[in-house]
Every structure is written in structure tokens, then in C-alpha cells.
Image (cartoon, rainbow, N blue to C red):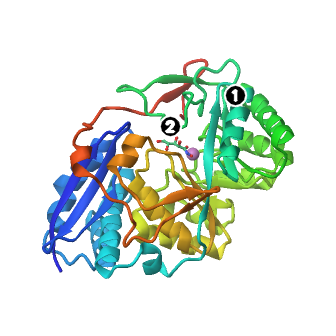
Amino acid sequence: MKIASARVIVTCPGRNFVTLKIETEDGAYGIGDATLNGREKAVVAYLEDHVVPTLIGRDPRRIEDIWQYLYRGAYWRRGPVTMRAIAAVDTALWDLKGKTLGVPLYDLLGGKSREGVMVYGHANGDDIEQTADEVQRYLELGYRAVRAQSGVPGVKGAYGVGRGQMFYEPADAALPTETVWSTPQYLDHAPKLFDALRERFGFGPHLLHDVHHRLTPLEAAQLGKSLEPHRLFWLEDVTPAENQEGFRLVRQHTTTPLAVGEIFNTLWDCKDLIQEQLIDYVRATVVGAGGLTHLRRIADFASVWQVRTGCHGATDLSPVTMGAALHFDAWVPNFGIQEYMRHTPETDAVFPHAYRFEAGLLYPGDAPGHGVDIDEALAARFPYEPKQLPVARLEDGTMWNW
Ligand code: EZ4
Ligand code: CO
């Protein structure tokens, strides 16, 4: 079996997606997601100029060897662009292997550990009341877990404020939108949001919250303590994790469960966080962390310290990543939860998929491979639109973390 071609497909059915399609000489194919929100073209060039030419003629069954070839062979290791390109190849090869053997990916990984995987949705609002109404909407849809974010009084465009519908998408303009951040006002406001939610919904539903890297370790510790009475499922990205040791201070002061890792691209980004038991959930997913080959390595490592998975699943992860992640979630023994932001109907039409939502759980389906395809003719009707993520500044103009 030999790889005959590999093509990069860029489409924008509501938002940009980059997809790699690998075909063999006998016409079998697999697809992988390579989307890097706001920096899509960098991965397109990396794939087309540097990766695709090395794939032609290779045996696609040798997934591990191809992964090692692309990782070690670049010499320049890690980083979001490199690791997304590797992820796209890896995902496409796992998909191809499943299809040629006629088995779903969860069987290739070792079989199902559960039937459906618990997901959480995003409730966003301008204020506490609007967020609470959104939480209610998700609970009525059957969700068992909901992430709640609300606007902060006096803070323009605080992270997570929705645009009035279920398809929240932060990449909103060709040049980054400027937003403002105030830590004191946020630290005052966040506990009030969860006071209101626990009062209205009780302690039955799981509630989650994302700080989106806005706090220092000490501020993160203060927030974790103030949210302990609300018993969150997790508090996410409380502080930037480049300095893994920063989480020690947070951990020493709070028992609120901590999640981090949607921007991690290898095990090396979370090695200390995991082995020192500084976090409870690792948020790496298929497209972000070098594909299934590397993601399961992270999960196995994490399992030694009882750290569980919580795959990133925002709308900038394409249905291809969602499909592959759901097979991983169905298998992984130390599963925690799966993020699930719904795609637009246009996106769902471009990427026909076997996965389905029912009563708060997502099911990967039993199609061979990851069960997600791409309708290339339809994809071609949605050309690329330049869009970048916002930036954030403190009130005095200082650049901050968005
Ligand atoms: O802001 O994926 O937990 N989910 C998130 C996401 C991220 C986007 C950035 O592209 O934080 O909504
Ligand atoms: Co997040």
C-alpha cells in the first residue's frame, strides 16, 4: 500500500477549516484536521511545502514511523504549526487504517470503555441573568455539564460573552478586535455568577468555568478559594502555563479542580503539571497535540497520576477533530469530559459525520475510521475568509492575555 496523493482543502462554512486528505494508489483515503484558529495559512504552507512531498510513495500503514519521521525529521521541534501539521497526517492515517480494515477507530485503540461520552456546552451571556438563562437552555437540551461565562460590569468584551446564539466564535475580524480586561472587577464578579447559578439550579448539574489565562498564580489561587463553595467540575486556564511551576502556588491554596491545556501541543508542555499532580484535567486534543499517536501517549502518562482527559472541543476544532476525539474518548480509561460547541449547519453539511448527541452524551458512531468525511464540492463553495482572534489590554493600555 502506498500514498499516492495528499491534498490540503481550505473551506469557510461559517469559519475557516483546514483539512488534509491522503489517498492511496488504490483510491482509499483518510482525512485529518489541521485548523489553527487565526493562523490557518501557516499550517497550509507547512503542509504543502514541507510535509506533503515527503509522504508520496510511503506506506500509510506505518503510522508510528511517519509520526516519528515528521517530528524528529523537522529538527525544529514542537509548536502549534508543526504539531497541527503532524496531527493532520496522523489523523488521516488512523482514519485510512480504520477504513481499510473496516473497523471504527475506538476498536483500533483498544475498544470502548464506555458507550457515550459526557460533554459540556457553553453558556455565555452579557450578564448573570442572561448566562443563567443560557445554562437553563442547555439543561433543557439534556446536557449534564455546562461551562458558564458572563460579561463583567464595566469590562468591554470580557472573554466568553456570546453573540446571542449557540455558535459562539471568537475569531471575528480580519484584524484583531481590541478588548479590555480588569482583574479586580472580574475577581469580584465571578463568585456572584456561581452564587446565582447554584441558587437557581442546585448542585445537580456540573458547572465549569474558563479564566482564559487572565490571572497571575496568586490571583488564580484567590479565585479558586472563592469558588470552592460552588463545587465546580473544573476551573480552566487560571494562569498561563508556559511556566508549569506557577501552578504549584495555585494548587497549594485551593481544592477547586484545575484544567489546562487547550494550547498545549506536546507532552512536554504538561509533563511537570501532570507528574507533580498540579492539575486534574489535561485539555489537549487530537488536532492540537500531534494526532491520536501523541494524544494517547499524553493520556497514558496522565493516567499514572490520576489526571483525566478533557479534550478541547470549541468550534475552531473541525468536525474531523471532534469525530477522532470521540473515538479516543470512548476508549481512554482516564476519561474526564469532552467540550462540545456546536458547529453551524453549513459546517455540518460540509463535514458529514457519524457522531451524534443524545441526552448529554456524544456517541462516536460505528463507521470505519473516525466516521467524518468532507464534501469537497460543497467545501469549494465557501472560500477562505481572513479572521483573527481578539487581543486584550488592561485598562491602562498594557497588553494582556486574551
Ligand atoms: O477560546 O478555541 O475552552 N475553550 C476555549 C475556546 C478558545 C478557542 C480559541 O480559538 O477557551 O473557546
Ligand atoms: Co478554554
The answer to whether 131 is drawn above or below residue 341 in the figure is above
Q: Position of residue 81 (x, y in %)?
A: 34, 51
User: Of the residues shown, which amino acid type is indicated by label 2?
Assistant: Phe
- 62 or 372, nearer to the observer: 372
Question: Which residue does the image show at 27% across and 79% down from the upper left?
Answer: 61
The answer to whether 83 is drawn above or below residue 240 in the figure is below
**Residue labelled with disc 2:** 167
**Residue labelled with disc 1:** 130
Find out whether the residues at labels 2 and 1 contact each other: C-beta distance under 8 Å. no
Question: Which residue does the image show at 19% across and 56% down from the upper left?
Answer: 7
The answer to whether 56 is drawn above or below residue 361 in the figure is below
Q: Position of residue 211 (x, y in %)?
A: 64, 40
Q: Position of residue 334 (x, y in %)?
A: 63, 71
- Check the picture and name the quadrant holding the N terminus: bottom left
Q: Earlier in the sequence, mark 2 or mark 1?
A: 1
Does the image show residue 283? no
Does the image show residue 152? yes
User: Of the residues shown, which amino acid type is indicated by label 1?
Assistant: Gln
Task: Say what secondary structure mark 1 lies in.
Answer: helix
Residue behind label 1 places its C-beta within 8 angstroms of ligand 1: no
Q: Position of residue 102 (x, y in %)?
A: 34, 79
- 155 or 395, nearer to the observer: 155
Question: Which residue does the image show at 50% across and 64% down from the upper left?
Answer: 326
The answer to whether 160 is drawn above or below residue 93 in the figure is above
How many numbered marks does the figure carry? 2
Query: Mark 2 packing: few (<14 Cα in 10 Å), some, or many (20+)?
Result: some
- 212 or 92, nearer to the observer: 92
